[in-house]
Image (cartoon, helix red, strand yellow):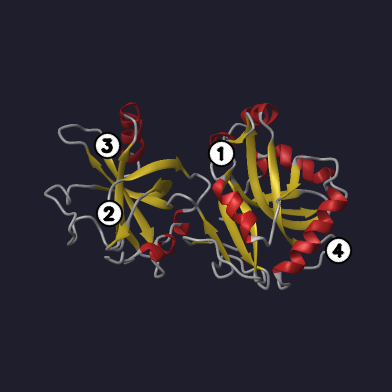
Amino acid sequence: MEAKSVDTIPSGDDWQYEPKWDGFRCLAFCDGVENFLQSKAGQPLARYFPDVVDALLRLTAKKFVIDGELVIEVDRRLSFDELQLRLHPAESRVQKLAAAHPATLILFDLLVNETGMSLVNMPFSERRRTLEKFAKQNLKRDRTIRLSPATTSLAQANRWLAKVGGNLDGIIAKRLDASYASGERTAMVKVKNIRTADCVVAGFRYASGAKVIGSLLLGLYDEAGLLHHVGFTSAFKTSDRRALTKKFEALRKPPGFTGNAPGGPSRWSSERTGEWEPVEPKIVVEVTYDHFTGGRFRHGTKIVRWRSDKVPRQCTLDQVAHREGRAIALL
């Protein structure tokens, strides 16, 4: 299941609320012999989180499929940077990182139970009750795997939202009557205190009078699979520009954008709008923004982090579509 971004927490008896953890979404498949960890984009994760794999093998239950979030705590705060460091090709490096800062898998859904029965067509309320029973029987001794708290109280959800930052990334609301719809955004929403979007870097511009990157051009996919230019970011350190230049020059490849491209009619066009270099759309970056109007971020965005855990095709316009065209009444 995927979460659709909304501005406010939905209310009513049909919803359950959970904290949105600042980590990697993870599916764990356990068959009694080995455990397979997979990102929501289908990327294998087990080799990067051997500590979690070992913890799953220690559970009493041996066969199950669970959905959760991988997190790493450093100095009592969750560190997304430490998660990114785990995605390293050297096994010795991964083992060293795991020993220094062990990971935790926070569970929030059970898709297949210990008997091998699929629960995906059950209402979420039943899956949650089954998950809580699973947690009570299996998670008593090992704190590497934990159950995510949940509530049907809107007041509690708002208290969680007020604490966003550090460990919490926002609030997730799930419909209690919904089955598990893989890849769909129909039964789960997320609310953040700041506006963010995961974008694909599909081009760049050189800085004026220099052969170093001045800005990165951002894109989002539509339902037809076309990649549209939606804005730019130039909020990176001067000391990082040369490394970024080398990285993206190596990815230069047309067309970059397959939908609306820089240089099209826009109130933001300038003389330099057409001067850009297309790159292969392989890099994902999370950015903050203020307004999204006319199919673009109104102003330059600010980089939050690089998202090596996300597949570019997951970066779609529905992240910002609900922001489009919102009017403010004049008094």
- Identity of the residue drawn at 31% across and 35% down: 245
Q: Earlier in the sequence, mark 2 or mark 4?
A: 4
Quick one: SS at disc 2?
A: loop
x, y (%) of residue 87? 57, 38
Tell me, yes or no, if residue 42 can be seen here. Answer: no
What residue does disc 1 label?
166
* Left or right position of 299 against 154: left
Q: Earlier in the sequence, mark 4 or mark 3?
A: 4
Look at the picture and state if 212 lies above or below 10.
above
- Quarter of the picture containing the N terminus is bottom right
x, y (%) of residue 18? 64, 55
Identify the mark at residue 115; answer none if there is no mark: 4
* Left or right position of 79 against 98: left
User: Between 245 and 174, which is closer to the camera in this rendering?
Assistant: 174
Q: CA distance from mark 2 to mark 3?
A: 21 Å
Quick one: SS at disc 1?
A: loop
Closest to the camera, between mark 2 and mark 4, is: 2
What residue does disc 2 label?
298
Tell me, yes or no, if residue 95 can be seen here. Answer: yes
Q: Residues within 10 Å of mark 3 (few under 14, many from 20)?
A: many
- Identity of the residue drawn at 34% across and 30% down: 237
Give the amino acid type for the residue marked by disc 4 in the picture: Thr
Look at the picture and state if 114 lies above or below 38.
below
Q: CA distance from mark 4 to mark 1?
A: 38 Å
x, y (%) of residue 125? 73, 68
Q: Residues within 10 Å of mark 1 (few under 14, many from 20)?
A: few
Identify the mark at residue 213; answer none if there is no mark: 3
User: Between 115 and 251, which is closer to the camera in this rendering?
Assistant: 115
Closest to the camera, between mark 2 and mark 3, is: 2
